[in-house]
Image (cartoon, grey):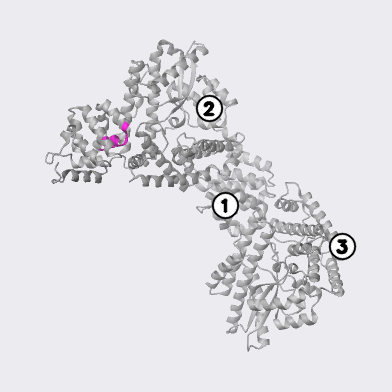
Amino acid sequence: MSAATGRPRSRTGRLARLGFTDAERAGRLLADPVLRPLLDPSSGEADEELLTALGATADPELALLGLLRLLEACGQDRDLARVLRDGGAVRDRLLAVLGASAALADHLSRHPEHWRVLEDDTATPADPRTDLLLAVGADPQAAEPVAAAAGQPGYDLMRTAYRRRLLALAGRDLTAADPVAVVDDVAAALADLAAAALEAGLALARAELGEDARDARLAVVAMGKTGGRELNYVSDVDVVYVAEPADGVEEERALEVAARLATGMARACSGPTGEGALWPVDAALRPEGRNGPLVRTLASHVAYYERWARTWEFQALLKARPVAGDADLGRAYVEAITPMVWRAAERDGFVADVQAMRRRVEEHVPSQQADRQLKLGAGGLRDVEFTVQLLQLVHGRTDDRLRSGNTLEALEALSRTGYVGRDDAADLDLAYRWLRVLEHRLQLHRLRRTHLLPTGREELRRLARACGLRDADTLERQWQQTRREVRRLHERLFYRPLLAAAARLSTDEVRLTPEAARSRLQALGYVDPAGALHHLTALTEGVSRRAAIQRQLLPVLLGWFADGADPDAGLLAFRRVSDELGTTHWYLKMLRDSGAAAERLAHVLSGSRLVAELLEKEAEATRWLGSDESLRPPGREALLTEARTAADRQQDPGAAVAVARGIRTREVLRTAIADVVGLLDDDAVAEALTDATVVALDVGLRAAVRVVEERTAGPLPTSVSVVGMGRLGGGELGYGSDADVVVVHRPLPGAPEALAQEAAVATVTELQRLLTAAGPDLPVGIDTGLRPEGRNGPVARTLDSYAEYYRRWAQPWERQALLRAVPVAGDEALAGAFTELVDPLRYPVGGLDAAAVREIRRVKARVERERIPRGRDPRRHLKLGPGGLADVEWVAQLLQLRHAAAVPALRTPSTTAALAAASAAALLDPDDAAVLTEAWRSASRIRNAAALWRGRPTDVLPESRRDLEGVARLLGYPPGAAADLEEDHLRRARRARAVMERVFYG
C-alpha cells in the first residue's frame, strides 16, 4: 500500500464521494475475505455498481457491515452472490434494508435464508394469518386454531415468521419510488400482520391451556392504529377483549378462562425470548382502564358504555375492529357499540372535551422534547388524527360515508363530502403521509417504539437518507415546515366553532328532513316556516358539493338566524347572497372553516336590513366576515388615496364619481357589519361614516369641476372649497345622514366675479347631481340649507361675500351653525382663509351679549314647536324631542359661543368633546355633563340601530313592537326586552331635558 501507488487514497476519496462517512473504515471492511466472490476480477476490488448501490443506502457503513454478516452466515450461498453481482431490484431491497435497519440486519444474521423473501416482486401474500398460524402448527381453517407448538419454542416460531414477512414488507417500502404514496398500504399491511400475530398468539395460548380453552368464546377487538389498519412498524397494539361462555359453561368460569387466554396471547407476542418481543399488547382502553377486568361479556361492555363511558372512550372506539378469536362475537361487539359511538357527539360538552383532551396530551410532552416529538407534539401526528376524528364524530352521526377507522380514508371522505376543503384535505393528507414515513423510518432502525427525532447529526443523516432526503439539514427544514402546516390546519379545523354548534343539535335537526326542518323552524320562531322550508330546499337540494356544504351549514345557521330579531329575513338574505356567491371557491369554504364568518353572517343578515340589502349588491364583502382586521375601517387618508387614484383613471367624470360612490357604499357596509358584530364603538362608527362621505365629496368636487370645465371649454375661473357643517363637520355622521355643507369660492386673478360666481354655482349643482344620481350605490344627500340667507341665498359665495354677509347680517343661529364648520374638500388655502374668517364669529371675544342669548333660546323654542311632525309623540323624536340630540347640542353650542374665546378646549366641532371641555373648565357640572353625554350617545345609537334594522334612516323611536325589538337586539338587549329599551331611552331623555332646561334656559 505504497503512497506512490495512490490507490488507498484514491479508494478512500471514491468511497467518501459515494456517501460513506467513514471511508477508511469502509475500506477495511471491503478488504474482508468474505467479499471475495463479489470482487471485480480485473481490479481485485469490490464491483463499482455494488459500491454505488451501498452508497445509495441510508447508512452505507451499516449496510456494508450487515452485508458482511449476512455473507458470513450464508456461507456458500451462490444465489445470494449472484444477486449481489448482477444487481437489480432484489439487491436494492436487501441493501436498503441493511442500510436502514440494524434490527432487521440482526434478524438476517440469525436467519440468513430469509433474504429470499426479497426475491418476490409481488406484494406480500394477502393472508398473513395463514402464514403465521402454519408457522406455529395450527390449522388456519379451524374455528378455534390450536398451535402444535407451545411455550417458548412456539413463540419463537411465530416471531420468526412475523419478522420474515416484516423483512419483505420493509424491502418493498424502502425501495418504493414514492414512499409517501404507499405509506397507507404499508401501514395497512403492518396492521394485518399484527392481527395475524394476535391470532397465532391466541392459538399458542389455547395450546398452553389445553381442553379448558373450549370453555370460553373470546374475541379480540383491535383499537387504535391496529383497528384503523394504519399501524407503525413498532407500536403498542391496543385491544379490547369480549368473552361469552361456551354452551353449558357458567359465566364466571368462562370469564376466568377467557382472561387466561388473553394473558397467554399477550405473552406470546410481548414476552421475552431469543427472537425478541414483537410489541406490547395493551388492553388499557378497556372499560375502567387498567382498573377494570381484563375481559367482559358483551352485555357488560354495552352496559358500561351506556352508563359510564367518557368522551375519550367513544373517540377510541371509532377504530374498533375485530381481528382475532371468535369472529361472530367480534362482529356482535362492533354492531352493539357502533351506534353509541356515532351518538357520542350529542353528549353535553363533547367538542370541548375532545379539544381539552388534545391540549392535555400536548401539555404532557416534556418541554425538552416538544420540538422533536413526532407523535404527540404540536404539528405532529396527533394533531391530524384528533382533527379528523372530531370532524368524523360530529358529522358522522348523520353521514355514514365518514365512518371509517382509518385516518387517511376518513380525511378523503371528509373532503369528498365537503366537510373539509379540497386544498386543506390535500395538504393535511400529504403532511400526514410524510410524517408517517418519517415515523416508519425512525422505528425501522432498531425496531423500537419511538417517536422522538434524534439530535445527533449522523442519526439525522441516516434518517434523512432513509426518507429520500439529501441530508440532515433538509430533514430539519421539512420537519419544521410540515409541523407549521399541520398546526395551522389543525387549529383552523379542530377549533372550528361550527363543530360545537353542530354537536349541540339532535340527529333529526342535523338531517334537515322536511318534517324535522318544519318542526325546528316553528320552534325557533320563524314566522313563515313554509317559506323558510322553501329556501332550505333551494339551498340544499341536489348532489353538488355546494349543496353538500349547505347541508352542513344550515342546521347550525338556522339557530343563529333565530338568535336575530328576523330569522325569516335572515334566511332569505342568505339564500340571495348564496345564489350570488355559491359557485365561488371561497365563499362556502370560508363559512365552513372560518372562526367567526358563518355566525357573523347569520347575525348580520337576521339583524340588519341595511346590511342584508347592501350585501346582496356587494356579495364579495362577505370575505370580511372571517377577519376582524378586514372589518376595521381603513381611515380617511387611505380611502382618499384609493379613491383619487381610481377616479383619475376614468375618462368620464361620471364614472369617476361612480368609483367614489362605490367606495363609500363599500365602507358604509364595512362599518355597518363591524357595528352589528360589535367591533366598533360609537365614535369609531361616526368617524368611519364621516370619512367615507368626505371621500365621496372630494372626488365628486373634482369631477364636478371637470364637467364644468368641459362644458365651458376652459379652466374653472375660481377655486372652490366645500365646508362640512352639522354632523358632517362634527365628525358625527350616522347611517343615512345628509351631508350639510356650505361652499366658498375665490375668483382667480383677473377672472370676472360674475363669471366666477356662475362657474361656482354650476360646480355645486353638478356636485349635487353626480352624488345623488340614480345608480347601484348609495347616494350622498347634500344639504346647503345652512348657507347665508338659507335656501333663498346662492349655493356658493366668494370669501369676500361671506365676510360682508357675516359682518352685516349674521344671526346668532348662524354663528351657532359655524361652530361645526370644518373644511372637507377642495382648495386647502381657501379653506384656511374661510376658517380664519369665521373663527371670530363662532368664538367671539367676550362671549355673547344678552340679546344674542335670548335670540338663541327663542329660536330653540320655535324649532321645538314647529319642526316635530304633527301627530307624533314628541317624546319619541330622537332629534328634536325633549332630551333629544338637539337639546344636548344646543346646550353645548351655547356654552361654546359664550366661553370658547376664553377656553380653547371648547373650540371643537364635537358635541361630546365640547361637553367634556365645559365640565373640565367648571362651566358645566360634571354630573350634568354625564347626563347630557349619555342621552346624546344613547339617541345617536338608537338612531343608527333603527337605520340598520329598517334599512333607511329615521329620527323617531319605533312604535311597532317588532321594529322596537329589532332595534333593541342590535343594541344588545336580550330577546323580549323592547320595552326596556323604550323605558331606558325615555328616562335618559327626561333627565337630559331637566339639565337642558336648567342650563340652557337658566
Looking at the rendered structure, the kind of residue marked 3 is: Arg
Give the left or right position of residue 799, taking residue 358 as reference.
right
Secondary structure type for disc 3: helix
Q: Is residue 639 above or below residue 377?
A: below
From the viewer's side, name the closer residue of 902 and 750: 902
Looking at the rendered structure, the kind of residue marked 2 is: Ile
* Residue 20 within the segment the image draws in magenta: no
Closest to the camera, between mark 1 and mark 3, is 3
From the viewer's side, name the closer residue of 76 and 245: 76
Between the residue at mark 1 and the residue at mark 3, the CA separation in whole angstroms equals 49 Å
Q: Is residue 138 above or below residue 753?
A: above
Say which quarter of the image contains residue 768: bottom right
Say which quarter of the image contains residue 177: top left
Query: Magenta region: which residues?
Result: 92-102
Tell me the residue at 66%/59% (across/down): 684
Q: Residues within 10 Å of mark 1 (few under 14, many from 20)?
A: many
Give the left or right position of residue 227, taking residue 614 as reference.
left
What residue would you read off at disc 3? 998
Closest to the camera, between mark 2 and mark 1, is 1
Secondary structure type for disc 1: helix
What residue would you read off at disc 1? 626
Outermost residue, left side = 42
Say which quarter of the image contains residue 126: top left
Q: Is residue 428 visible?
A: yes
Between the residue at mark 2 and the residue at mark 1, the CA separation in whole angstroms equals 39 Å
Looking at the rendered structure, the kind of residue marked 1 is: Gly
What residue would you read off at disc 2? 337
Give how far across and how far down residue 914 sits, in percent.
Answer: 75, 65
Tell me the residue at 25%/30% (across/down): 115
Q: Main secondary structure of the magenta part?
A: helix
